[in-house]
Amino acid sequence: MNNVLLATDSRALLDRVHAAADGACIGVHASPLPTDPAVFLGQVRRTELPDIVVLDATQARPQAVALAGSFDRLFPGIGLVLVAEPDDSLVIEALRAGVRDVVPPDVTVEQMREVLARVGDATRVRRGAGHSGEMALGAASWDPVVDASGPSRVISVLSPKGGVGKTTVATNLAVGLAAAQPGSTVLVDLDLQFGDVATALGLEPESTLGDIVTHGGHQDPIALKTRLTQHSSGLLVAGAPSDPASADVVTPEHVGALLDQLTELFPYVVIDTAAGLGAHTLAAGDHTTDPLLVTSMDVPGVRGLRKELDALNDLGMMTDSRRILLNFADPRAGLSLGDVEATLGVRVDLSMPHTRAAVVSMNMGEPLTTRQPRDAAAKVLRKLQATYQGANAPRGRKSGKKVRS
């Protein structure tokens, strides 16, 4: 059996290739399509190489051909298939890039099965020649730009109450991480009843968390990836259900299973939680490596956060690698930073001012760091991103104490 890696944004094509490969197929999004094989392979967080890579070139033909050529140079033991409307110029380009076959977008399951078998046989012969010294086989595994073997960072953005800018923080952080490392980041909207991550990003998801768990996406990584919504930054999003009534289908057990899948697929998982410490947030806490607690600079917000910190300490949850972000920081608010820290009993890591640009960006459905990168709040958000980024950044540890509701 051939192990297949397919790059496509077409769910129909993914279903056909998955069937043709008898289930031995992993799908990744084709847009944006990197031209570096290491970056491309890093999206699936696996260390073994696929036997065949299938690239959907219907939307990004030059990038697909360039990626195929890079694969052929670096990993000659992998068979390459291009999906596109075949024409003479494309066939010539594809052959020069080392592609073994070009198939049309409406290829049937049986036709694709024949192609995969033929290409798989050819690559096995090619690998055999490499072992006899006639051809170098690239490598048995790859060293992706995004470390595929290291633990994922699960960053949960928490707050005891709403209206403190939690979604602004979560969306901008996730977009920044995704833009810096293509294919690295997924954002989960765990405010199941009233989540507005999709609105903040200007997205209209075809599938939500309710659809993911209903159709088994929390158990099947292939089904899961087809139901994530892609932002223009490359960020993938698991949106909240479209209405509060639909939220009941998502259980805390679903959340745990979903995060198990996502941490296998992505180096960064950012979670925008609901206000407070509900059952779903506690389920996410079992997987959280980096808790980020957000409060506004007012007495109710600060006192609420102190209660939340005390509750987490009592539960033995999310006590490591915790960061505190003070939003709407204003020296004229009647509170000083010292007052806030004295009430919380911990140090505030970052203070973010209230700016008009932040409000406008939310209303426009555009991340602040993209729309107004020089804004004072945007600068704080980029600084926050930097604390989680980089191979040498310290990683948090999962809570040793499991809490189930």
Image (tube, grey):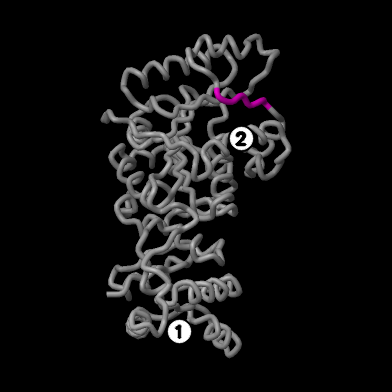
**Residue that label 2 marks:** 383
Name the amino acid, label 1.
Answer: Asp
Residue 150, image x, y percentages? 39, 47
Which residue shows up at 39% across the image and 16% down it? 310
Horizontal relation, residue 353 to residue 24: left or right: right
Marks 1, 2: nearer the viewer? 2
Give the Cα distance between marks 1 and 2.
Answer: 46 Å
Identify whether 19 is placed above or below 400: below
Task: State whether residue 242 is above or below residue 101.
Answer: above
**Magenta region includes residue 147:** no
- The furthest residue to the bottom: 88
Helix, strand or loop for disc 2: helix
Q: Which mark is residue 101?
A: 1
Magenta: main secondary structure equals: strand
Q: Position of residue 378 (x, y in %)?
A: 66, 36
Residue 353 in the magenta stretch? The answer is yes
Residue at the spot 65% in from the left edge and 41% down from the top edge: 369
Magenta residue span: 349-354
Q: Which residue sits at x=28%, y=72%?
A: 22
Whether residue 374 is visible to the viewer of this picture, yes or no, is yes
Q: Quadrant of the C terminus?
A: top left
Q: Position of residue 274 (x, y in %)?
A: 44, 31
What's under tag 2, amino acid-wise? Lys
- Which element carries disc 1, helix, strand or loop? strand
Q: Residues within 10 Å of mark 2 (few under 14, many from 20)?
A: some
Q: Nearer the viewer, residue 43 or 279?
A: 43
Mark 1 or 2 closer to N-term? 1
Residue nearest the viewer, comparing 208 with 2: 2
Q: Are there few (<14), some (14-19), or many (20+) residues within 10 Å of tag 1?
A: some
